[in-house]
Image (spheres, grey):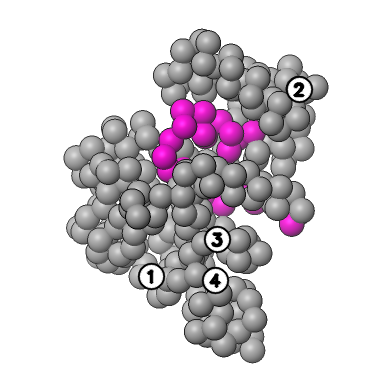
């Protein structure tokens, strides 16, 4: 199986403080990999290193076959990225946002046009194509932001708490998009605080104080810790408490 994200003892120190401590894992092509941890565990730091935005202190990592020390520009071209504070322009329309980001990702005008039609149709946004993004419901904005992160058809997409602030049904609709992208071979690397979402991942890692404390399928983690849900696993590992 092709490995799309590989981290080998990847470490980031800020002065004497070790934010990410020798994390090691490999994510398969088309896998949905959940990257969990309590606030301050080091997830964002790790993700920024993998996206080529922050130089590691030590260890190695490759994303889409490129090295995080020496090939950061190539990595940036080949990844999609969406954060909780996703960067849609609220004062542009849906159509204008797609066009703007298409241009940033280097798509030509005909490709932008066909992608625009595809996204409008797929997300049933035809009626609001010329409406300002500011007036859309949050769940619609999140799905639009994900579609825009996928405009240049990256092999891997990094999602940093992409579904914050919406209800479980709206989150589920977002996850339908993730499953479809993954089944088409896109690798999904996602952080979340929602444990229903952790259950949806193929595999989950849980970080505590900069280290990966557990990494397996949700089912095997539940079995290993003898609990009914990923929330139970998370409480034991990340919060140091048991809810059994
Ligand atoms: N530039 C920096 N300089 C110093 N310390 C930093 C810096 N960036 C992050 N840290 C520290 O590293 C630790 C890990 O932060 P990080 O943002 O990676 O955690 P996180 O798991 O993403 O948390 P959250 O879920 O709150 O986003 C925190 O204690 C944070 O204060």
> Which range is magenta?
144-168
Crowd class of label 2 (few under 14; some 14 to 19; many from 20; radius 10 Å)? some
Of residue 123 and residue 53, the one placed in the foreground of this image is: 123
* Identity of the residue furthest to the top in this view: 109
Of residue 86 and residue 113, the one placed in the foreground of this image is: 113
Sequence-wise first label, 2 or 1? 2
Q: Which mark is residue 126?
A: 2
x and y, in percent, of residue 41 in the image: 44, 65
From the image, tell me which residue sits under label 4: 218
Give the structural element (helix, strand or loop) at label 1: strand
Q: Is residue 19 above or below residue 135?
A: below
Q: Is the Cβ of the residue at disc 4 closer than 8 Å to that at disc 3?
A: yes
Give the structural element (helix, strand or loop) at label 3: loop
Crowd class of label 4 (few under 14; some 14 to 19; many from 20; radius 10 Å)? many
x and y, in percent, of residue 186 in the image: 47, 43
Of residue 233 and residue 17, the one placed in the foreground of this image is: 233
Q: Is residue 191 above or below residue 120?
A: below
Q: Which mark is residue 201?
A: 3
Sequence-wise first label, 4 or 3? 3
x and y, in percent, of residue 67 in the image: 23, 44
Horizontally, residue 89 falls left or right of residue 72, namely right
For the N terminus, the quadrant is bottom left
User: Ligand 1: does it lie within 8 Å of the C-beta at label 3?
Assistant: no
Residue 1 is at least partly visible in this image = yes
Q: Is residue 17 magenta?
A: no
């Amino acid at each position: 199986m092709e490995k799309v994200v590989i981290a080998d003892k990847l470490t980031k120190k800020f002065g004497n403080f070790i934010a990410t401590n020798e994390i090691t894992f490999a994510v398969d092509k088309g896998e949905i990999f959940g990257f969990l941890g309590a606030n301050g565990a080091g997830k964002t730091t790790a993700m920024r290193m993998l996206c080529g935005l922050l130089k590691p202190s030590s260890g190695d990592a490759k994303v889409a076959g490129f090295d995080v020390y020496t090939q950061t520009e190539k990595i940036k071209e080949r990844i999609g990225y969406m954060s909780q504070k996703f960067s849609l322009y609220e004062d542009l329309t849906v159509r204008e946002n797609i066009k703007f980001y298409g241009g940033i990702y280097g798509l030509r005008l005909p490709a932008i046009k066909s992608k625009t039609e595809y996204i409008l149709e797929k997300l049933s946004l035809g009626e609001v194509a010329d409406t300002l993004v500011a007036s859309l419901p949050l769940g619609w904005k999140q799905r639009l932001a994900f579609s825009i992160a996928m405009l240049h058809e990256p092999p891997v997409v990094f999602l940093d708490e992409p579904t914050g602030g919406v209800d479980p049904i709206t989150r589920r609709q977002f996850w339908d998009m993730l499953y479809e992208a993954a089944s088409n071979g896109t690798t999904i690397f996602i952080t979340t605080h929602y444990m229903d979402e952790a259950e949806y991942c193929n595999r989950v890692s849980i970080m505590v104080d900069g280290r990966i404390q557990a990494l397996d399928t949700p089912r095997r983690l539940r079995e290993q810790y003898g609990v009914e849900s990923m929330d139970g696993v998370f409480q034991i590992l990340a919060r140091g408490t048991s809810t059994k």
